[in-house]
């Protein structure tokens, strides 16, 4: 499995049939097709599309990409010189956490695009001439990504990024913001930031997903109650079947089997459930609850360390459940100093 996935819009990705009879188009097509193979050497996977409508269709699943490459010309099926298409494509990228590049042979040839390109660069985009060989271009992308905070925040915890990219945590704007905030402040050791509400958002989404794939099983009687966070968490971490022929519960016979969730993971789940509940309903409003004249700041750094480590344990465990359910393709890729599942 390649880790970095690139959406590349360039009319040179058109089929051999469309390029037939035009030697320049055929040579360019072969060059970009080879680029797809070369990309694997850098841990990249290229999704190349020749036309704008195909680009828009792919962009609906933007969460699977980390990089977008745009050509300046040839993006319209009907008009290969329609310069407006580049601007429209770039406008569609606004607000998305994607590294973007222009890779074109006409960067300096069209004065009408000068200001559009300048705006593109002000937004963090990078322009590269097609005179630059594709392996050198890929090396530049690799260097940029290794230096990018967005990637760097996940160093050592790339499985959290994998959960988002693979859709195992629903990659909505809300969950992206929550996960990125957690990782950013953890990376920066910012103890003034309280991660608990964002952790709660991720945990709630995890439980939603476990219901969707049948790990948490609903019955007609439990359907209403199981929608509650605590009920879902208890299903995984606490609920046990009643003892046979006696009162009470058989704590060695949990509803969610030990082979799916070991005792240690259950304890961590309960801790995070209690912590995020208490923060949401009590601690946030009562920061001086400990003793008179003593604030929670004295303990907050240690509590946060425990919370972050518990959160990471749960994310690792959850990814393992998704892999076991064959909804992921496990593998290993190395991008510079970044090692990934």
Image (tube, rainbow, N blue to C red):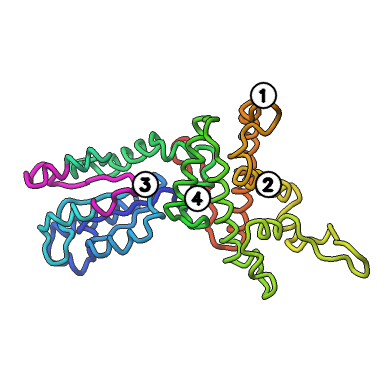
Task: For the residues labelled 1 and 4, say whether their Cβ atoms are less than 8 Å apart.
Answer: no
In the rendered image, the vertical position of residue 27 relative to residue 247, given as above or below: above
Which labelled disc corresponds to residue 97? 3
Name the element at disc 3.
Answer: loop
Q: Is residue 282 left or right of residue 64?
A: right
Spatial CA distance of label 1 from label 2 is: 25 Å
Which labelled disc corresponds to residue 274? 2
What residue is shown at x 53% (from left), y 30% (from top)? 192
Among the two numbered marks 3 and 2 on one chain, the one whose residue lies closer to the N terminus: 3
Q: Which residue is mark 1?
A: 293
Among the two numbered marks 1 and 4 on one chain, the one whose residue lies closer to the N terminus: 4
In the rendered image, the vertical position of residue 336 relative to residue 291, given as above or below: below
**1 or 4: mark nearer the eye:** 1
Image coordinates for residue 65, horizontal then vertical, percent: 38, 52
Residue 112 is one of the magenta-drawn residues: yes
Spatial CA distance of label 2 from label 4 is: 26 Å
- Name, please, the residue furthest toward the top: 293
Which labelled disc corresponds to residue 162? 4
As rendered, which of 51 and 252 lies closer to the eye?
Answer: 252
What residue is shown at x 54% (from left), y 54% (from top)? 330
Q: Which residues are magenta?
A: 90-117
Spatial CA distance of label 4 from label 3 is: 15 Å
Q: Is residue 68 left or right of residue 242?
A: left
Name the element at disc 4.
Answer: helix
Decide if residue 40 is in sight here. Answer: no
**4 or 3: mark nearer the eye:** 3
Image coordinates for residue 127, horizontal then vertical, percent: 21, 41
Q: Is residue 160 left or right of residue 137?
A: right
Among the two numbered marks 1 and 2 on one chain, the one whose residue lies closer to the N terminus: 2
Among the two numbered marks 2 and 4 on one chain, the one whose residue lies closer to the N terminus: 4
């Amino acid at each position: 499995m390649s880790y970095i996935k690139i959406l590349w819009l360039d009319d040179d990705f058109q089929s051999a049939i469309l390029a037939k009879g035009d030697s320049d188009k055929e040579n360019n097509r072969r060059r970009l097709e080879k680029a797809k193979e070369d990309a694997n050497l850098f841990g990249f996977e290229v999704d190349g599309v020749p036309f704008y409508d195909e680009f828009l269709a792919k962009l609906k699943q933007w969460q699977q990409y980390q990089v977008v490459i745009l050509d300046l010309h040839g993006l319209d099926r009907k008009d290969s010189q329609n310069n407006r298409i580049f601007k429209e494509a770039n406008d569609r990228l606004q607000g998305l956490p994607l590294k973007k590049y222009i890779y074109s042979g006409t960067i300096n040839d069209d004065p009408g695009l000068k200001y559009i390109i300048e705006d593109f660069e002000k937004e963090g985009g990078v322009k590269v001439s097609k005179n630059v060989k594709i392996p050198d271009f890929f090396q530049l992308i690799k260097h940029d990504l290794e230096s990018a905070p967005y990637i760097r925040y996940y160093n050592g915890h790339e499985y959290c990024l994998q959960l988002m990219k693979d859709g195992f945590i629903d990659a909505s704007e809300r969950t992206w913001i929550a996960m990125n905030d957690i990782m950013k402040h953890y990376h920066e050791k910012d103890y003034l930031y309280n991660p608990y509400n964002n952790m709660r958002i991720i945990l709630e989404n995890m439980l939603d997903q476990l219901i969707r794939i049948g790990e948490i099983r609903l019955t007609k009687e439990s359907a209403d109650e199981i929608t509650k966070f605590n009920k879902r968490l208890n299903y995984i971490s606490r609920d046990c079947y009643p003892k046979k022929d006696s009162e009470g519960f058989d704590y060695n016979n949990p509803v969610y089997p030990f082979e799916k969730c070991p005792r240690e993971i259950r304890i961590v789940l309960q801790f995070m459930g209690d912590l995020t509940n208490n923060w949401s309903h009590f601690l946030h409003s009562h920061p001086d609850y400990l003793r008179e004249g003593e604030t929670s700041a004295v303990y907050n750094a240690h509590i946060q360390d425990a919370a972050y480590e518990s959160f990471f344990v749960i994310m690792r465990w959850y990814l393992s459940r998704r892999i076991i359910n064959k909804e992921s393709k496990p593998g290993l890729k190395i991008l510079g100093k970044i090692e990934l599942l």
